[in-house]
Amino acid sequence: MITMLNEKSRRGRGHVLLWILAWTSAVVAFTGSTTKARNVPPTASLRESEAAAFGGAVQASAAPPVPDNLTKRERIEFMLWRAWHSMGNPRPRSKEVRECIAFFRGCQRQLGHKKLLVDAAGGHGGIACVFLAHKRADRAIVVDLYQPTSFENLRLAWAEGSDASVKYHIADVSSPDWLSSLLDKEAGDLQPSEIAVVSCHACSLLSDELIRACTQSQVDFALMPCCHGEDSRKGKMMLNTAKMLGIPHDMLIDISRLGIIEESSGYKASMRCIDSSITPQNRILLGLRESEADAEKRELARSASLYRLARKYRHIGIPLGKGAGSMTVVQGVQLRCCGVRDQYRVSWCVCAF
Ligand SMILES: C[S@@+](CC[C@H](N)C(=O)[O-])C[C@H]1O[C@@H](n2cnc3c(N)ncnc32)[C@H](O)[C@@H]1O
């Protein structure tokens, strides 16, 4: 009996010790990570082991309390992890949770607060839920061909009880007017500037379709493409070009997408990267609506660059004003190149606008 009691109390002590260990390692891992997080890409600090430590603590007893030395954003992330550990199955893998958090961190500041967020090809809907948890959107719609069961579990764990709402919409985002029809139905009198489309791991051609749909509807967007490449002439051309240049094929494709966004009327493009240890497909392409002032600045910069380029070569040809064309420098005047006739003679015309 005594041996049994000793055995029992040893096991009991063992459980308590395990519980304390799990709980303290969760808190220490998280708080330790947050001090580092101020200087390094912060998502790198929320590793699987830390998540597992939260999980251990959650399973061993009541959920661990939120450490009080966290910033507002870190508190929300802590609560998301905690809720993920205690939610039912099926649930997204921890890698997917890290992706959602990293994606959010990578583009939320640029997108700003939105009244409506569309999570395109959203699958489990984790991206939408993270934006709602951080109150960076009032409501969200997850759009996908299929609704996985994990969506409802994640919604209950991450978005239930908040004022914001998230719902599912089944649609094919490769069809030409899926976004405009969705916005006709759901956006009411919202302005395009109050809406954003996000997509994490938009496979292959879906990324191109999303860029087209977003620029047509004039909304801000952030996409993290994956599964690069297509079985077509363009696909082969990209593959051969990447080989010739000695750069990764997916990098070339994303850079060319950046150029397409930048050339879309009224848009400015930028790229952000999340920690590549979370996913090697880690490039976020941002398309943000350009203000009128920015558009004007862009046009002036373009004219000034063309003008500088033309001046650079003036010493090698017929002096200005004596050739077939003439060049005048007037502020607020757009220079338009009329053509390069031969290597030594460039002529310009000046058009008022
Ligand atoms: C790689 S998963 C990404 C899911 C989620 N965004 C994530 O980060 O885990 C690609 C998603 O695209 C969806 N999908 C594929 N083709 C689609 C289409 N034509 N229209 C809408 N969704 C599509 C799939 O159902 C899948 O959920």
Image (tube, rainbow, N blue to C red):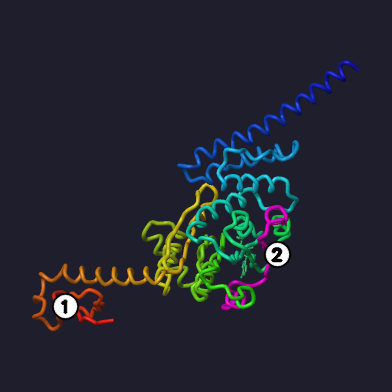
Front-most of residues 341 and 318: 318
Q: Quick one: SS at disc 2?
A: loop
| Residue farthest along the right direction in this orientation | 1
Query: Where residue 98 sits: x, y (%)?
Result: 59, 49
- Residue at (11%, 76%) from the top-left corner? 320
Q: Is residue 275 left or right of residue 59?
A: left
Q: Is mark 2 within 8 Å of ligand 1?
A: no
Observer-nearest of 245 and 215 = 215
Q: Ligand 1 shows up in which quadrant of the image?
A: bottom right
Q: Which residue is mark 2?
A: 147
Amino acid type of the residue that numbered disc 2 sits on in the rendered structure: Gln
- Quarter of the figure with residue 16: top right
Q: Nearer the viewer, residue 338 or 247?
A: 338
> Viewer-proximal residue, 26 or 79?
79
Residue at x 69% of width, y 41% of height: 55
Q: CB at mark 1 closer than 8 A to ligand 1?
A: no
Looking at the image, residue 4 lies above or below residue 143: above
- The quadrant of the rendering that contains the N terminus is top right
> Which residue is located at x 8 percent, y 75 percent?
319
Residue 20 position by quadrant:
top right
For residue 292, above or below residue 96: below
Rendering coords of residue 301 (x, y %): 29, 68
Q: Amino acid at mark 1?
A: Met
Q: Which residues are magenta?
A: 156-183
Q: Which residue is mark 1?
A: 327
Characterize the local packing of mark 1: few (<14), some (14-19) or many (20 or more) Cα atoms within 10 angstroms. Answer: some
